[in-house]
C-alpha cells in the first residue's frame, strides 16, 4: 500500500488559516491520500496553529504534530523535516500551496516503478523542456515540487542539507547528487502542486527574525545568490553554467537586469561576497560582462570610473565638474 511507502511533511509557521485549507483538501472524503501519514512541523508559531492541530488530530489519527522550541527559519525547518522522514518516500508540502489531486494516480505509478526523484510541478517549464536538467532543477527549487526516495538521504547528503539552510534550498543537494550520477528527475505529465506563496521569496530569509541582529550573510541573502551556492555543486561545469543561466533569465528577465541587481544589492554597498558567489557559476565572458556593467553603474552613481576584478575595486579616473 502507498500508505506504507509515503509520508507527507508540512513545515509551517504562523499560517494556521492557510494550513487549515491545505489539510482540509488532503483529508477530504474524496481525497486519494486522506489516509496517508501527515506530519505538521511547526516552526514555533505564535498563532492558533497548536490548538488547531490538536483539535484536528482527534478526528484524524494519521495526523502527527511536532513543534520546534524555536523558529529555525524556513531553511532550518525544511532540513529538520527531511531528517524526520521515516518512510520510503517523503513529500514536503508547503502550508500555502495549491494541490491538484487528479494527478495522484501518476504519482502512484511513478512510485511503483521505483522513480527516486519525482518532479510534481511544471509552472516554470516551457514546451520541450520535459527532459531539460536546467529547467527541471529550477522547477524543483520549489520545495513542494519534490517527492523523493529517502535512500538519497545519506550522512553526507544530510550534512549538505544542513549546510544549505542559509541558502533556503536545503532540499536540493540530494537531487543534485542524483543528477551528478547521471539521472534525470521524473516529471509528472499533470502537475500535482503549484506555488501558492503570497510573499516574495527573498523576504523568507528574514521572516520571523529581528533583521538588525542577523549576520550580514543572512540578512543580505537573495534567491539568486542562494541558488548560485547550490548550483555550484553540479559536477559538470557546462551544465552548472546552463542551470544558472536558465535561472537568471527566469528570475530577472534579462542579463542586464541581473547585473543591475547585483550592483545595487551588493557591490554599491561594499558587500562583495554575494557577487563573487554568483560570479563563480557564470561563463567567463559573462563574468567580464558583469564587471564591465558594474564599472559603468559605479561611474554613473559616483561620477568616477572604477575597474572591478573579482571584487577588487580600483579607481582610475575622477571627474570634477
Image (cartoon, helix red, strand yellow):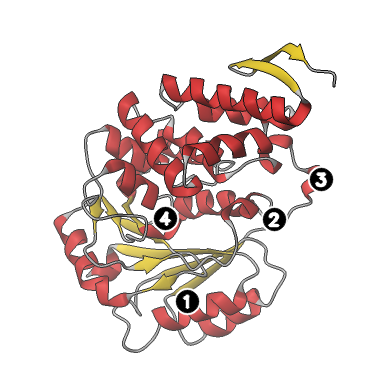
Residue 208: % across, % down: 71, 57
User: Mark 3 touching mark 4, by CB under 8 A?
Assistant: no
- What distance separates the C-alpha of mark 3 from that of mark 1? 33 Å
Give residue 85's mark.
4
Task: Label 4: state its secondary structure.
Answer: loop
- What distance separates the C-alpha of mark 3 from that of mark 2? 18 Å
Tell whether 39 sits left or right of 269. Answer: left
- For the question of whether residue 164 can be seen, the reply is no
- Which residue is the extreme one toward the right? 321
Q: Earlier in the sequence, mark 3 or mark 1?
A: 1
Closer to viewer: mark 2 or mark 1 = 1
- What distance separates the C-alpha of mark 1 from that of mark 4? 20 Å
Q: Nearer the viewer, residue 5 or 19?
A: 19
Closer to viewer: mark 1 or mark 4 = 1
- Which residue is the extreme one toward the left? 113
**Which residue matches tag 3?**
212
Residue 293: % across, % down: 58, 27
Looking at the picture, does residue 183 appear above or below residue 111?
above
- What distance separates the C-alpha of mark 2 from that of mark 4? 20 Å
**Which residue matches tag 2?**
70
Task: Label 3: state its secondary structure.
Answer: helix
User: Mark 2 touching mark 4, by CB under 8 A?
Assistant: no
**Which residue matches tag 1?**
22
- Mark 2 nearby-residue class (10 Å; few <14, some 14–19, many ≥20): few
Give residue 86's mark.
none
The structure residue drawn at horizontal position 34% and vertical position 50%, both measured from the top left corner, is 150
- What distance separates the C-alpha of mark 3 from that of mark 4? 34 Å
Tell whether 317 sits left or right of 126. Answer: right
User: Mark 1 touching mark 4, by CB under 8 A?
Assistant: no
Q: Earlier in the sequence, mark 2 or mark 4?
A: 2
Residue 65: % across, % down: 54, 69
Amino acid at each position: 500500500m502507498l500508505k506504507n511507502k509515503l509520508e507527507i511533511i508540512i513545515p509551517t509557521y504562523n499560517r494556521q488559516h492557510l494550513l487549515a485549507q491545505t489539510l482540509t483538501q488532503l483529508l477530504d472524503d474524496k481525497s486519494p491520500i486522506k489516509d496517508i501519514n501527515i506530519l505538521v512541523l511547526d516552526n514555533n508559531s505564535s498563532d492558533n496553529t497548536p490548538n488547531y492541530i490538536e483539535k484536528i488530530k482527534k478526528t484524524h489519527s494519521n495526523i502527527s504534530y511536532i513543534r520546534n522550541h524555536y523558529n529555525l527559519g524556513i531553511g532550518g525547518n525544511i532540513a529538520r523535516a527531511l531528517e524526520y522522514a521515516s518512510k520510503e518516500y517523503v513529500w514536503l508540502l508547503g502550508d500555502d500551496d495549491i494541490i491538484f489531486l487528479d494527478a495522484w494516480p501518476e504519482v502512484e505509478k511513478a512510485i511503483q516503478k521505483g522513480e527516486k526523484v519525482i518532479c510534481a510541478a511544471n509552472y516554470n517549464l516551457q514546451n520541450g523542456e520535459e527532459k531539460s536538467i536546467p529547467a527541471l532543477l529550477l522547477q524543483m527549487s520549489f520545495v513542494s515540487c519534490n517527492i523523493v526516495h529517502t535512500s538519497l538521504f545519506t550522512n553526507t547528503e544530510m550534512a549538505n542539507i544542513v549546510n544549505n539552510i542559509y541558502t533556503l534550498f536545503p532540499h536540493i543537494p540530494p537531487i543534485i547528487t542524483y543528477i551528478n550520477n547521471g539521472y534525470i528527475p521524473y516529471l509528472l505529465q499533470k502537475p500535482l502542486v503549484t506555488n501558492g506563496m503570497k510573499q516574495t521569496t527573498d523576504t523568507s530569509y528574514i521572516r520571523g527574525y529581528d533583521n538588525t541582529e542577523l549576520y550580514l550573510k543572512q540578512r543580505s541573502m537573495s534567491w539568486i545568490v542562494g541558488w548560485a551556492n547550490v548550483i555550484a555543486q553540479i559536477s559538470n561545469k557546462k551544465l552548472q553554467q546552463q542551470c544558472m543561466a536558465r535561472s537568471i533569465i527566469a528570475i530577472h528577465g534579462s542579463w542586464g537586469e541581473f547585473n543591475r541587481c547585483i550592483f545595487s544589492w551588493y557591490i554599491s554597498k561594499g558587500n562583495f561576497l554575494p557577487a563573487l558567489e554568483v560570479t563563480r557559476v557564470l561563463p567567463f565572458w559573462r563574468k567580464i560582462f558583469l564587471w564591465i556593467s558594474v564599472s559603468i553603474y559605479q561611474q554613473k552613481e559616483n561620477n568616477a570610473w572604477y575597474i572591478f576584478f573579482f571584487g577588487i575595486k580600483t579607481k582610475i579616473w575622477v571627474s570634477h565638474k
